[in-house]
Amino acid sequence: MADTEIKAKIKNLICSTLGVEADALEYDTALFGDDSIGLDSVDSLEIIAFVDEEYGVDMTGVGKEHFLNIDSIADYIESHK
Amino acid sequence: MTNDKTRCVITGLGMISAIGNNVQECWNNAMNSVSGIDHTKTVDTENCYSDFAAEVKGDAWDNIPGTDGMDRASKLCIKAVAEAMKDSSLSDFAGDERVSVIMGSCVGGVASAEIYYTKEKDSALIPQMPISAIASQAAGYCHAGGTVTNVANACAAGTISISYAADLIRMGKADIVVAGGADSFASVPFAGFTSLHALDDHPCSPFNHLSGITLGEGAGALIVESYEHAVKRGAKIYCEVLGSGITSDAHHITAPRPDGECQMNAIRRAISDSGITEADIDYVNAHGTGTAKNDEAEFLSLHTIFDGKNDDLSVSSTKAMTGHCLGAAGAVEAVFAVKALTENILPPTLGFSEEDLVVLAERAGKIDFVPNKPRKKEIDTVMSNSFAFGGNNASIVFSKNPGDIAAPDKKEKICITGLGIVTPAGNGKDKYIANCNDDGFEEPGDMRSAVGKTEYDELGLKMAFYRKLDNFSQLQAVSGMYALKDGNYCVNDDNSSDIGIIVGTSEGALSPVCDFEMLIAEKGNANGSAFKFPNTVYNAAGGYLSICSGIKGYNVTATNGAHSGLFSVGYAMDVIRLGREKAMLATGTDENNDIMHELYSGLGLAADKPEAPYSGSDKFTLSDGSTSLLLEDETYAKSRGAKIYAYAAGFGTAHKNVKTGSLSGSGEALDSAINNALCDAGIGTDKIDAVIGFADGHKVIDSIETDSLARIFGDKLKKLPVISVKQHLGEGRAASAALGAAHAALMISGDIAESSCFFIDGGKAVAGKTKSAELNNILVLSFAAGGSYSAAVIAR
């Protein structure tokens, strides 16, 4: 399990930069696609840029399964930093 | 066949781009398959994955007398305008009200914003930043005195400007329109498209590798003229301007609809509007940017529309030579299309290797994409297409033949059936009425409108949508949706293409532009925000409104200073009278925030304390808001049982050039705008019962209004109620201009029973009250720095 600090920072990015309301976003909330909070490809660019700048992890071209939710993004960062 | 009064022709061409400083240079280079794309040397590319751009070479644009201190985009524009006028054997227009200037732009004065935020906060740069400056300065250069505005619809702006130019002529509102578009290459678009990963890391290759765009810059200008006027003065006629189609995707703020539905609607409208068939189109200058999303959608649209109906179609994208010139693209490409038509040679799509040609053969089917080399072909009719951020689509047809275009119907009455109002003193029409009637206006603290969850929930807007909107877009989305709701207009599959939008704004998305500029100034061009960049285009607000409302018809953002909020009403009336739509949302929106306050303070205009109209100050209270009016043709409104507040009976606009950002000396243009509006409404000054003016406390602004009213109304002025919606709400610029029209409609309908007003006597204003029941015709006025004015008659 990735540490909660990473998750908190990603959540903060999604709320403060991408305009998602905090009470609608848990760490396992689906981010993209149907039945999600409705992020799209432009939002994914912001997440990728943040992860690169903050943790030096390049997620460009990484599979969709790593962008399911905050948990999966944090796991990817944890295993690639 | 199109009757001579409705015929519209091109009589002059001007262009500057990466492949030449004039039309002949650009055309010769296109004929030699020369690309203007190279590694940029003008913006910082550190850590950026691509450094290609198609920049204008040399300084031919920078040495035109009278353009000192102007932004690069305005200078590029005026370079093309000067060439087009000379080509058309036209000289200075000397204030001719029958001459208009319509210019497209996407990023406007970003070069000036870049200097302001990275080098020196020189206040002289401030009036150069908004898109508004371009058409106003171009009109100043040639002394045009008619309709002056900018079309700010991103990459479709240049094409829409020519379409609107032809519409103005067909409506009988102009004899000559200088139309086109201009944009300059700068850090904001470069960093923005970098953040979206939308730049190709090689020179772009439209309809080929589909790996991104290469940014260009430049300007195109076309002299669009009434056929009869051109013949009368013995002008050289290049070709006819036939029909056009403008639609909105209602889909996504940056990506086109993958199914191409509204793109195809634009193309089909252009063909049917022209009175021709698919088989008549010989050549299409495509949008062809080189991104997968655009080009795939465009392949689909072209095949769907033309396959089986036209087996001899040629299509090319000239962007492989000029780069993507954004707001200038449609204008530059229209010039290429007209040259192709008159020279009978097709410009090429560059960039295909032998292997690429094999792939192209599969994708192209029977369509000839003119790969690599120009080709001779006898052609009669050409089309130019542009598709934009915000989901805007535009298509226009040029031909050697006059086509079969219907004359506009000027008789249909246009009514106001819905109102959406967002102000610093509260939101919604009912709140505004309550403020006016009973409650009185509370003194709003900081004169900044706010919308939030209450409004979104009321209007059924979801978080997945509204989270993306910047403040300007939020204000516009809420007031627009309020107007639809108030008008009981339910947008559905049957009527979504019958309704369109004109957003009027003074500063538009200038705050997001400055915000983005500050971001990249601090973090570098490699670190722009993909989330923020789409909101830097002025038409984002209109695009979002299309998305949340489902409106798929006409969609234009018009910007030329504060009067744009009333200008939008006149523009929407034209769209309805031309039969392009049955209903239109006409809006005025501007925002007040720290950036705007700094810029207006830098100009010495923003007051620290509330300033009342006619107070003789040298400042005004900067404010903001958004007002949307739903306009419909009367037959349509009655058929759906709509409540009619009032009628938009007449509209007029005029321009008298004064220094950018100033107003003194332009008052006679207000007289003209008023006379034009009265003439359009078919009434005289004796029928006007009240005026909604534009006084905001600034003595220059206020005296232009009172002086003009004195000239127009004479002795009657003493007893004529003059209302200012800025009395309680400050100078909201386009929002105030549109609110004036809404206030008039609410007085005519009786929703506002009584209004505070002023009586002007000998230049002095005395406060009073006026009862609405006594009013049948209200004259609404608005002004714009630079010397443009609009006037409208709102009638019972």
Image (cartoon, coloured by chain):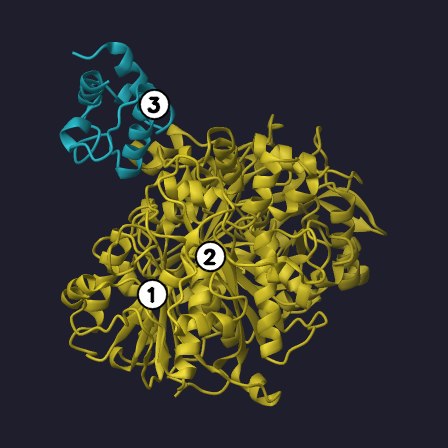
Chain colours: A cyan, B yellow
Q: Mark 1 points at which residue?
A: B317
Q: Mark 3 points at which residue?
A: A13
Badge 2 and badge 3 in a common chain: no
The quadrant holding residue B531 is top left
Amino acid under disc 2: Gly
Amino acid under disc 1: Ser
Using the image as rendered, state which of residue B762 and residue B239 is in the foreground: B239
On residue B327, the disc is 2
- Tell me the CA gap for discs 2 and 3: 32 Å
Please name the residue shown 45% across and 74% down the image: B28
As drawn, is A63 to the left or to the right of B648? left
Q: In x, y percent, where is residue B285?
A: 35, 69
> Can the viewer see residue B560 in this picture?
no
Q: In x, y percent, where is residue B305?
A: 22, 70
- Figure check: B605 above or below B779: above
As drawn, is B201 to the left or to the right of B504? left
User: In which chain is the residue bearing label 1?
Assistant: B
Q: Which residue lies furthest to the right in this view?
A: B762
Circle 1 packing at 10 Å, graded few (<14), some (14-19), many (20+), is many
On residue B35, the disc is none
As drawn, is B739 to the left or to the right of B756? left
The quadrant holding residue B552 is bottom left
Asked which secondary structure carries label 1, the reply is: loop
Q: In x, y percent, where is residue B446?
A: 60, 27
Asked which secondary structure carries label 3, the reply is: helix
Please name the residue shown 26% across and 28% down the image: A58
Label 2 close to label 1 by CB (< 8 Å):
no
**Number of callouts:** 3
**Mark before the other along the chain sequence, 2 or 1:** 1
> Can the viewer see residue B136 in this picture?
yes
Using the image as rendered, state which of residue B173 and residue B438 is in the foreground: B173
